[in-house]
């Protein structure tokens, strides 16, 4: 059974809902999913076969700067070769934060599932569960 970490930051609850649904899809696929808020996430991800990171778009389409960005910066150097999925919600813009984040993760050597799952405003639970199932098979 794969052990997968789902690590997120959420300001409005939308990205947290996405994390819960993604973890639900992982569990339905037989994976062992552990969910962490970025403020309490493990610094060492070596015990996880895969990691899903979730963060909404903030400000001028950037990652949340006080909790999530420092956390991601601290672990991204250890993602080389690791299977990684990205997800998040947004209320404006066109998803540029996700494209930038995906490019950054790839540049660090992460093996990305795809270009990331983005949901505008309230997330679609079934799409998020499907994304979790897709990650389980990745």
Image: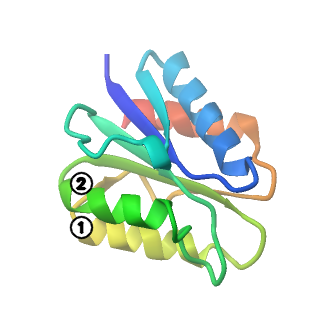
Q: Quadrant of the C terminus?
A: top left
Badge 1 crowding class, 10 Å Cα cut-off, few under 14, some 14 to 19, many 20 or more, is some
Depicted 137 relative to depicted 39: above or below:
above
Residue 51 % position (x, y): 37, 42
Examine the rendering and report whether any part of residue 123 can be seen. Answer: yes
Q: Are marks 1 and 2 in contact (CB under 8 Å)?
A: yes
Q: Visible in this render: residue 115?
A: no
Q: Is residue 8 left or right of residue 76?
A: right
Give the class, few, some or many, for how many residues have Cα within 10 Å of label 2's Cα (few <14, many ≥20): some
Question: Split into 4 quadrants, where in the image is the N terminus?
Answer: top left
Residue 49 vs residue 54: left or right?
A: left
| Left or right relative to 124: residue 84 | left
As helix, strand or loop, the secondary structure at mark 2 comes to loop
Residue 39 placed where, x, y %? 48, 48
Q: Nearer the viewer, residue 64 or 2?
A: 64
Q: Name the mark on residue 108.
A: 1
| Residue 24 x/y as whole percent | 59, 25
Q: Nearer the viewer, residue 124 or 36?
A: 36
Q: What percent of the width, then of the height, locates residue 63?
A: 53, 69
Query: Tag 1's secondary structure?
Result: loop
Circle 2 residue: 79
Q: Is residue 109 above or below residue 40?
A: below
Query: Earlier along the polypeptide chain: callout 1 or callout 2?
Result: 2
Which residue appears at 38% of the width and 73% of the height?
103
At a point 26% along the width and 41% down the height, the residue shown is 45
Left or right: residue 50 versus residue 31 is left
Residue at figure coordinates x 64%, y 33% from the top left: 21
Labelled disc at residue 21:
none
The Cα atoms of the two marked residues, 1 and 2, are separated by 7 Å
């Amino acid at each position: 059974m794969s052990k997968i970490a789902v690590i997120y930051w959420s300001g409005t609850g939308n990205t947290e809902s996405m994390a819960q649904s993604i973890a639900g899809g992982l569990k339905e696929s037989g994976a062992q999913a552990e969910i962490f808020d970025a403020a309490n996430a493990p610094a060492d991800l070596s015990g996880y076969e895969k990691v899903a990171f979730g963060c909404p778009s903030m400000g001028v389409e950037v990652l949340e700067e006080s909790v999530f960005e420092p956390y991601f910066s601290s672990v991204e150097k250890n993602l080389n070769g690791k299977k990684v999925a990205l997800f998040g919600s947004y209320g404006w813009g066109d998803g540029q934060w996700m494209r930038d984040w995906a490019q950054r993760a790839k540049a660090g050597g992460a093996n990305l599932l795809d270009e990331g799952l983005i949901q505008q405003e309230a997330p679609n639970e079934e799409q998020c569960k499907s994304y979790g199932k897709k990650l389980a098979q990745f």
